[in-house]
Image (tube, rainbow, N blue to C red):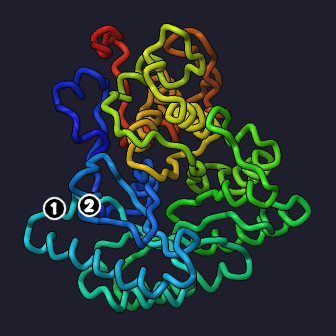
Amino acid sequence: MRFFNSMDIEKLKGIFHILPEFFDRDNNKEVLSYTLGATLYTPATKVNLIKSVQKYGELMSSVICLEDSIGDNEVEMAETYLVDQFMKLYDMVISEQIEYQDIPLLFIRVRNKEQMNRLIDNLDGAYKLITGFVFPKFNKKNGHDYFNALRDLNKRMNKTYYSMPILESEDIMFKDLRSSNLENIREIFELNKDLVLNIRIGAADFCRQFGIRRNYNSSIYDISVVNDCISDIINYFSRQNNFIISGPVWEYYNNMENELDYIDLMAEHNLNDNHYSSKSKLNLIDAYTLGLIKETIKDKENGLLGKTIIHPSQISPVQSVYIVSYEEYMDAVDIIENSTGNIGVLKSIKTNKMNEVKTHYNWAKKVINRAKFYGVYNDKQKRSNLLA
């Protein structure tokens, strides 16, 4: 697996100073936590796993939902259908019609720990295709039960399934309840750090508590009460690069799967430019996708990595934002290389900022890890060539 691998290799070599590295579906947690990219959520009643693999080659991770996206009266039918989908996909892997490494990281959002075990028991050999489980409405009351069940399952199946807990309940959203609950959840995460692949933020559920819904031309960070909660989540779980947190879902999409090359469009703005001029080729993008790009840039600036999406047209815009600029990369390398010396402050490669070794060290580690899997832009490539 590799980000942007469906693009022509010669074009990639022209765009990238450092190409994205290949990774394996069965890599360790440290690798997989950085390689989720744009995570596509699909209701279990509508998922087509074979189509997802064959049509959406840029998709690196997917969540099949058995919780809020389906009705309470659909659960049994959805479980049966989901098992059937996994079995068909597994049969195509066994018959070598589909490569195992071409399958995105697959997660199931379950309703409870009993459902997690029931699904695995019905999957026969297809259980090998699952990377982990999403724990909805994660809180201090259900947290230990979920992780105890996951550990028991891993031991029974002799396989490591990872978790992606979602922070989305009112005991996290409401200010007067938040601190004590986040503290308790952090204790649970620390006890089970080896199984926490990624922490997800249920911003849509947070908005629901207040009857709020953001528009396509604003971001979740413009919703003050939700931004306040996201800030606290980052404060509790992103200290010293402790856990990887992903950006919340973007609800708007263009139903037309356009052919725009988002890697080139992001290169034009060097990833960090939040100004969109009237002459910019970003004006070719529909308003819904432009809103997605702007919010993903804000996710990245706040230390989040990856994003929940609901439509395949959102895959490329999100993943293109996470490519590392040449300037970012060289600053990060300089900081890491001088971290064991006696130098406190360095002049940046562009001589436009100071790099404090101790202050920016954790930032630099994140940039290096992101560069490994999303690649680094070639700063010397002319923009006119990129956009031709």
The kind of residue on which mark 2 rests is: Ile
Instruction: Kindly identify the residue that appears in the image at 48 percent across and 29 percent down.
Output: 286
Question: Quadrant of the rendered structure where residue 48 is?
Answer: bottom left
Depth check, front residue: 326 or 11 = 11
Answer yes or no: do the residues labelled 1 and 2 have beta carbons within 8 Å?
A: yes
Task: Give me the disc on residue 99.
Answer: 1
Instruction: Kindly identify the residue that appears in the image at 44 percent across and 62 percent down.
Output: 42
Q: Is residue 314 above or below residue 387?
A: below
State the separation of the CA atoms marked 1 and 2. Answer: 7 Å
Badge 2 marks a residue whose secondary structure is: loop
Q: Position of residue 71 (x, y in %)?
A: 55, 77
Depth check, front residue: 202 or 359 = 202
Determine crowd level at label 2: few under 14, some 14-19, many 20+ residues with C-alpha closer than 10 A: many
Depth check, front residue: 156 or 127 = 127
Mark 2 sits on what residue? 103
The kind of residue on which mark 1 rests is: Glu
Instruction: Kindly identify the residue that appears in the image at 38 percent across and 29 percent down.
Output: 262
Q: Is residue 118 above or below residue 310?
A: below
Q: Is residue 155 visible?
A: yes
Task: Give me the disc on residue 62.
Answer: none
Question: Quadrant of the rendered structure where residue 358 is?
Answer: top right
